[in-house]
Amino acid sequence: MDAVFRALADPSRRRLLDQLRDHDGQTLRELCAGLDMARQSVSKHLAALEGAGLVTTVRRGREKLHYLNAAPINAIAERWISRFDRGRVTALADLKRALEQSPMDS
């Protein structure tokens, strides 16, 4: 779990995971297009995410497709959140999401 926490600590890596969550199976070129980072930097971040088990890859011809692997994040949630009332945690997360998405009238 330490490797997962280290990988998630970096905002650039979290952005890469967000991109894969929104559209799984992207090439390095596609991932670079969504970030203001050099290709080599994106490659290093992807290597760290792969090392932590958060990203898996599949070769398709000459291309390498990157996929999000949510299992390590789920393991963290199971370990840390399952100790608490999951229903309350889910309700609070839903409320937070709803409040952030809808503008409040003045």
Image (spheres, helix red, strand yellow):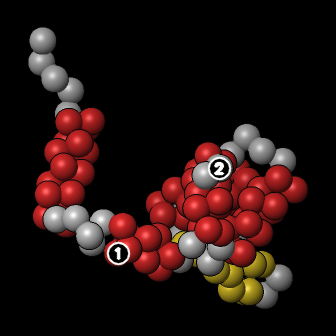
Position of residue 71 relative to residue 39, above or below, is: below
Q: Nearer the viewer, residue 86 or 50?
A: 86
Residue at 25% of width from left, 38% of height from top? 101
Position of residue 66 relative to residue 40, above or below, is: below
Q: Nearer the viewer, residue 94 or 22?
A: 94
Q: Position of residue 72 (x, y in %)?
A: 51, 76
Residue 59 visible in the current orientation:
yes
- Contact flag, marks 1 and 2 (Cβ < 8 Å): no
Q: Residues within 10 Å of mark 2 (few under 14, many from 20)?
A: few
Residue at 26% of width from left, 70% of height from top? 83
Q: Residue 6: which quarter of the image?
A: bottom right
Q: Earlier in the sequence, mark 1 or mark 2?
A: 2
Q: Position of residue 47 (x, y in %)?
A: 77, 69
Which amino acid type corresponds to the residue marked 1 in the rendered image? Glu
Which amino acid type corresponds to the residue marked 2 in the rendered image? Asp
Q: Nearer the viewer, mark 1 or mark 2?
A: 1
Residue at 27% of width from left, 72% of height from top? 82
User: Which residue position holds label 1?
Assistant: 78
Q: Position of residue 84 (x, y in %)?
A: 22, 65
User: Which residue position holds label 2?
Assistant: 10
Label 1 element class: helix
Position of residue 100 relative to residue 45, above or below, is: above
Q: Is residue 77 found left or right of 64 in the rendered image?
A: left
Q: Residue 58: which quarter of the image?
A: bottom right
